[in-house]
Amino acid sequence: MQLYQIWLIAALALIIFEIFSATFGAICFAIGAGFSALAAGLGLNLTWQIVIFAVVSLLTFIFLRPFMMKFLDRKSKDVKTNADALVGRKALVSERIDASQHTGRVAVDGDDWKAVSMDGSIIEKGTEVEIVKLDSIILTVKELKTEN
């Protein structure tokens, strides 16, 4: 087996590892291994191949990885998902909200949720409200004032 083939196998293994880890670290080594495979194919000795691997890997860690982390990693903690994304949304009262009766429901995106009013007031059916808080499966809402 030729030395360039070993470098290519190492690069491929690192790419596969990167797919499963998504840390953008293994891809830097894979790029270094790819350049070392090119060096081996051009006939450079093993010492130069290792130097090229180290330098290219280091450069990709310094310059490419921060770019990839910033623009390709979409795991932002500011993005609300699932039920947390309901806060700030508008909903329509589907059953009169009355704290004294412990009743009240709102409809949002086709789902019906138990609701309470923020200030304990009664909100009639058909009124548009804004969701201000989520507590387990109960939404806290406030009535939206309509301007005439």
Image: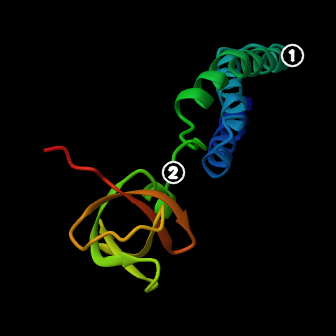
Q: Name which residue lies at 47% across and 68% down.
A: 120
Q: Is residue 136 left or right of residue 81?
A: right
Q: Is residue 45 above or below residue 144?
A: above
- Which image quadrant: the C terminus? top left
Q: Nearer the viewer, residue 64 or 145?
A: 145
- The spot of residue 67 in percent (x, y) is 59, 22
Q: Which color scheme does this rendered protein use?
A: rainbow
Q: Residue under label 1, please give it.
A: 47
Q: Is residue 96 left or right of residue 19?
A: left
Instruction: Give the class, few, some or many, for how many residues have Cα within 10 Å of label 1's Cα (few <14, many ≥20).
Output: few
Furthest residue in direction bottom, as rendered: 101
**Of callouts 1 and 2, the N-terminal one:** 1
Instruction: Give the class, few, some or many, for how many residues have Cα within 10 Å of label 2's Cα (few <14, many ≥20).
Output: few
Q: Nearer the viewer, mark 1 or mark 2?
A: 2
The three-letter code of the residue at mark 1 reads: Thr
The three-letter code of the residue at mark 2 reads: Lys
Q: Nearer the viewer, residue 110 or 113?
A: 113
Q: Residue under label 2, please give it.
A: 80
Residues at circles 1 and 2 in contact by the CB criterion of under 8 Å:
no
- The spot of residue 145 in percent (x, y) is 27, 50
